Amino acid sequence: MSVLRDSVLRRGGLPQRLVPKVEFGKDGSFSVGSESKPDFRLLAATTALDFVNDKTNEALTNGLLRHGSIASLLKDKGASVVPMAFAYNILQPMITRQLIMQDGVEFKEAEFESNYKSFEDYLNSEEDEYLLSAPLANFAMEADMERVGPFNIRKLNADEFAVYNGIAADSDSLARIFPFGHLRFVLEMTAVVKRGFPALTQTHQDCFWWFVAIMKLTETGSVGFDTIWCRPLSWTGMSVRVGTAYPRRRIVGRPYTLQSQSLPRLRHYWKLVEQIAEKQPPFWKVALQRFCDAVDRPRPDEALVDYWIACESLFGEDVEFGEFAYRLSLRIAHFLGTEPVERKKIRATVKEAYRARGLLLHGARNLDQSKLMAQTSAMEEITREALCKCLKDQIQSRDEMIRQIEASIVGNPAPQ
């Protein structure tokens, strides 16, 4: 702490940083100002460097580096067992935590004891813990937080709102977010990985994808994420963001609202997904991928083509090209409908949408846009219903599903 106090004295006080200050209105609006806050992380970084560069501390630093658990920790992190690595991976996090816990440079022994014990516990473990967070675009719900499986869906506080939306203390930064809306909620889970391994595994990424996919099966609306933030909850490491270089914009005109009455269904779907997510992907996952893409398409013609690709992936096996519309509409009707009248209605809707799909793919122009919108909306619901049935019935084999559909057709001929 003496090194810390000397560092503050040399700088004429605590280093400060200018940060955005967001205030929310009762109507959901917000305003942005700025405020100055102590920069504990900068102070910790400079103090850690001052400590290891001070020749009077050389023997102490080298003694710590020879300690087996310290050396092992640095090696697990891919760092050399040298003073600078010790400063970055151990000393700097410890000082930062201490400053935050005691909210300043005045030493508080109780906070130090707690801080040091957590470090000892970490040395004795072989794992790193991370908070994985995906800001949800175009999303809203009534509650401030809900729990579904391993995930929390929660509302951002003012500081997080500024970070996730890229708002700086300079008000000009707001221009980047206004045209396409702003992020209000985050989807997050904790992840424990073996020390030294990447924070975000493919399994973790798949979990986020599956969750948003079943959200789209649960409610209508365009929702998604483009980036997963990885923040260390344990002692060492740095925050990183993993995402696509070409983020997809959600359809602001089709916001996604998670209704409270839909939460039991979402939780049920997640339990079903947990049984299959880490196994061989189900045959209907390709259809689900196309469905998710279609929901976020701003153009109804592009979305309609995607919905049809999804349905062809589900029901198009062993169908000759010449009878494609006839056979596919028949299969979809018997898969989703139970009564002749219901099946007839589904068949008519599917055949009409298939005709529109054919016109689109062959370059037809001047299509009735209101009719096209209605056909696209109808195919969205049909595709959603088919995928929900695949999930709820845990259908594993396309061959078996098609055999059952064909048996239904033979036993109960659909109206022509």
Image (cartoon, grey):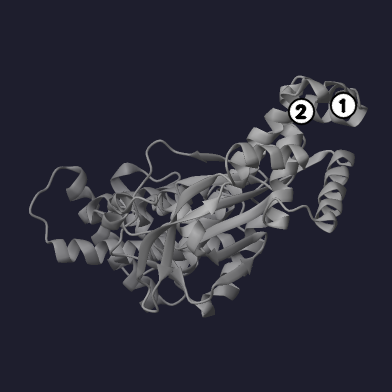
Q: Residue at x 69, y 38 (%)?
A: 6
| Residue 86: image tag | 2
Residue 139 image offset from top left, x and y in percent = 43, 64
Residue 182 image offset from top left, x and y in percent = 37, 59
42 relative to 375 in the view: left or right: right
Q: Nearer the viewer, mark 2 or mark 1?
A: 1
Q: Secondary structure at mark 1?
A: helix
Camera-nearest residue between 99 and 257 = 99
| Residue 87: image tag | none
Camera-nearest residue between 401 and 19 = 19
Neighbor class of circle 2 (other Cα within 10 Å; few <14, some 14-19, many 20+) is many
Q: Quadrant of residue 63?
A: top right
The answer to whether residue 200 shows anywhere in this view is: no
Which amino acid lies under the numbered mark 1 shown in the image of this protein? Leu
Q: Secondary structure at mark 2?
A: helix
Camera-nearest residue between 286 and 62 = 62
For the residues bearing labels 2 and 1, Cβ distance under 8 angstroms: no
Compare marks 2 and 1 and give the one earlier in the sequence.
1
Q: Residue at x 87, y 49 (%)?
A: 117
Q: Quadrant of residue 60?
A: top right
Q: Quadrant of the C terminus?
A: bottom left
In this rendering, is residue 313 above or below 373? above
394 relative to 254 in the view: left or right: right
Neighbor class of circle 1 (other Cα within 10 Å; few <14, some 14-19, many 20+) is few
